[in-house]
Image (cartoon, helix red, strand yellow):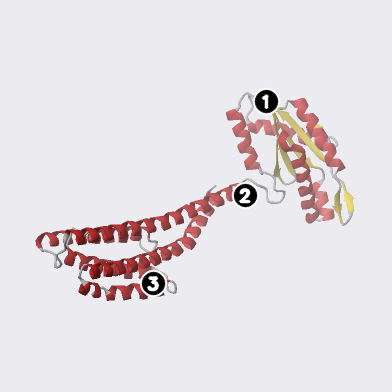
Amino acid sequence: MNIVNKIKNTVFINSCTRCTPHYFTLVMQWSYWLIILYFFCYIIFTVYFGLSIYGAIITPWILAAIVSLHFIRRFPGRRHLFLYTILLLSWLIFFVINFGWDCGGQHFIMPLMVIVFFSIYDTIPRKLLFLGILFALRLYLFFYCMNHTPIIQLSAVSNAVLQIMNTSFIFIHMAVVCLIFSTNIQNAEKQLMIYNQELQKQACTDPLTTLHNRRYMMDLLENQTSVKPHDRFCVALGDIDLFKKINDTRGHNFGDLVLRELAELFKDSVKDKGYVCRWGGEEFFFFLPDMNLDQASEFINSLNIAVSKLPIHDNGDPIHVTMTFGVEEYDYQSSLTNLIKSADDKLYYGKKHGRNRVIF
């Protein structure tokens, strides 16, 4: 389980490492596009209300945003967050000093907080430090505005328009940032779910035969005895006769072929009657719910006959193998360990008394 958990964590980290920088770059691109759009709206605002000189002053910010947007795809990374922070905070300070507190310029801090807290390029202490700086800056501007009148005196209408423009930009900006990063998180969670399912499947599957493995079967049996303690069921252990001789004389590749062919036969035979797994080596284990010992023995006996009739081709020659089975019924009292041991004892009794038989 520790190995599986380590694999899960590695997969999740690698997935986030691959995806998050892409999404972070996308956030920065959208942020620059939005701030450029905002600046042009601001220019229109200044022209319309006769404040053209304050519209011309914004030229350095527009040029800085355009240049940064041009280079962000070629050189993704933390530097763009730093540049965008300088761009937005310098504009915030300029805006609040010139237009005052009531126009909502101080809220430009909010999108920055969201971007920084989603950033993978900074540690938690740095993020908290940045939060403290933003908080201190906001308090400073608040007290500054309490003691200084705005440089630009706006009418009620122009003040309302500017407030609406700022609020709209901030809400859209935060919505875009949250949407992109939440999509990243959802995709990462979806990938993690897929990987978890695949890891769970691999952890419970024998790679050679694609049957369930012993771990899966034990979980199944434990669930059966705990959830349905009064339901009858049988178990059976089957072992390929003289399998070592098969490997020694015909090679391990043919031995693997035997295991795979038998696994396919068992899958087709069991289907909705029960469950089969590769118990280990050349052993197969069967869990047969809702069967008593007579029914299970009849089923395993017919399966044993099918095994002996199954042709397994080695270089064109049909080869037949046989198996020996031990079958045991759950007595509602024995532990699973004792139940399986009883079936195993019967199996080895059959091995010692001629093989190719079902002992029940």
- Residue highlighted by disc 3: 69
Identify which residue, 119 or 14, lies in the foreground: 119
First in residue order: circle 2 vs circle 3: 3
Residue 176 in sight here: yes
Query: Which kind of residue does numbered mark 2 sit on?
Result: Gln
The residue tagged with tag 2: helix, strand or loop?
helix
What's the residue at 84%, 54% (across, down)?
249
Q: Amino acid type of disc 1?
A: Arg
Q: What kind of element bears circle 3?
A: helix
How far apart, in angstroms, are the residues tagged by discs 2 and 3?
A: 45 Å
How many other residues sit within 10 Å of disc 3, few (<14), some (14-19) or many (≥20)?
Answer: many
Q: Which residue is the site of mark 1?
A: 232
> Which sits in the foreground, 214 or 104?
104
Q: Which mark is residue 2?
A: none
Judged from the image, the secondary structure of the residue bearing numbered disc 1 is: loop
222 on left or right of 346:
left
Q: Is residue 359 visible?
A: no
The residue that label 2 is drawn on is: 202
Residue type, numbered disc 3: Leu
Q: Residue 321: image x %, image y %?
A: 84, 45
Q: Earlier in the sequence, mark 2 or mark 1?
A: 2
Mark closer to the chain start, 1 or 3: 3
Q: Residue at x 83, y 41 (%)?
A: 307
| Whole-number angstrom distance, CA of label 2 to CA of label 1 | 30 Å
As drawn, 209 above or below 120: above
Residue 152 as seen in the image, left or right of residue 319: left
